[in-house]
Amino acid sequence: SINSDVAGLFENLAAGESVDAKVQASIARENEKLKEYAIKLIGKLPTNHPGNGEFSHPISVANMVSASLDLLERPLSTIQREEITRLGDEYDEAYALANASYGESTYQLERFLDEFELKERFVSSLYDSLDPDQADAVVDPRIRGRVQLDALSPSVMLMGRTQPMAVRTRAELRDRLIDRAAELLPVGRDRLSQLAVFDDWVRELDPILEPQPRHLLDMYRADEVTVAGRAQLRAMKQLAETLELDESERGTLRDLQLMLVPRMRAEE
């Protein structure tokens, strides 16, 4: 199955081994089917991020989970279907509430993270509603929530929206974040380096700064992206308040959608 193939690929990468060409071809074929399905959904489900936003909508995810379990002869029970429906309704209410709160000053990154987190919460609760053997059969625990690997995770929304930032130390991370801010804003690097916002930013990233082996540097988990995204959003808002930016410069921050995902390199 594609589940076992992808999990096997992950283990190969972890061990520094080459991936079997037949396994790669099998995964590619299944991914093409998923792409066709995703294209058919565009514009048919509510999202602020067309494309994979529809594909990762709870209705789509629930349908894929149900179909997978039927094929595996481990179908959802009536009680499970009712619970998943309730979770979907809960998502719809929270999504509508979030959208009603947005205005012209809302950051694009905030809109994205709100939807991303709501979907992550739905998927997590959906797995809780499954029996352990059902959950493991749908998505292998080794790849659950991993960018590039888990098609049922909202991490599919991250394509083109994240950039890993591999560093060796927290001091290097602070310097790299300052460099990126200096590229984006008309403020000298010397002034930026004096701001406490970058210390706060690094501190907030601490939960995801465990050293990672090379093969995991760009295969982060959805929950790690949430930490990185929220830290970046708070930093951008702090910069907008602290610096004397004109409306155009503030707009640059509000419109920014790329998320930096710092990764601490493990010693090899």
Image: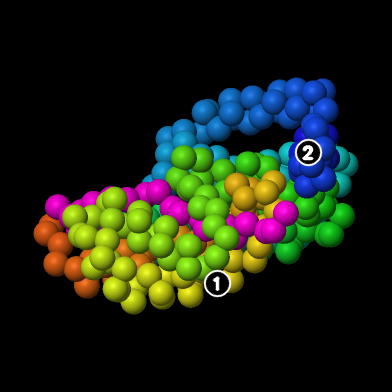
Q: Nearer the viewer, mark 2 or mark 1?
A: 1
The quadrant in which the N terminus is found is top right
Q: Nearer the viewer, residue 49 or 150?
A: 150
Query: Could you tell which of marks 2 and 1 lies nearer the N-terminus?
Result: 2
Task: From this view, report whether residue 65 is shown above or below residue 126.
Answer: above
User: Which residue is under mark 2?
Assistant: 9
Residue lying at 75% horizontally and 23% vertically, measured from the top left: 25
Magenta span of residues: 248-268
User: Which residue is under mark 1?
Assistant: 206
Q: Is residue 239 left or right of residue 135?
A: left
Where does the image place residue 231, in percent across and percent down from the top left? 44, 67
Q: Is residue 115 left or right of residue 26?
A: left
Q: Amino acid at mark 2?
A: Leu
Measured in 3D between alpha carbons, the distance from the residue under mark 2 to the one under mark 1, in whole angstroms, is: 29 Å
Secondary structure of the residue carrying numbered label 1:
helix
Q: Is residue 136 left or right of residue 195?
A: right
Q: Can residue 52 be seen from the camera position used here?
A: yes
Secondary structure of the residue carrying numbered label 2:
helix
Q: Is residue 221 left or right of residue 104?
A: right
Query: Circles 2 and 1: CB distance less than 8 Å?
Result: no
Residue lying at 31% horizontally and 57% vertically, measured from the top left: 181
Where does the image place residue 155, in percent across and percent down from the top left? 57, 49
Q: Residues within 10 Å of mark 1 (few under 14, many from 20)?
A: few
Residue lying at 55% horizontally and 65% vertically, measured from the top left: 169
Q: Amino acid at mark 1?
A: Asp
Residue lying at 34% horizontally and 76% vertically, measured from the top left: 196
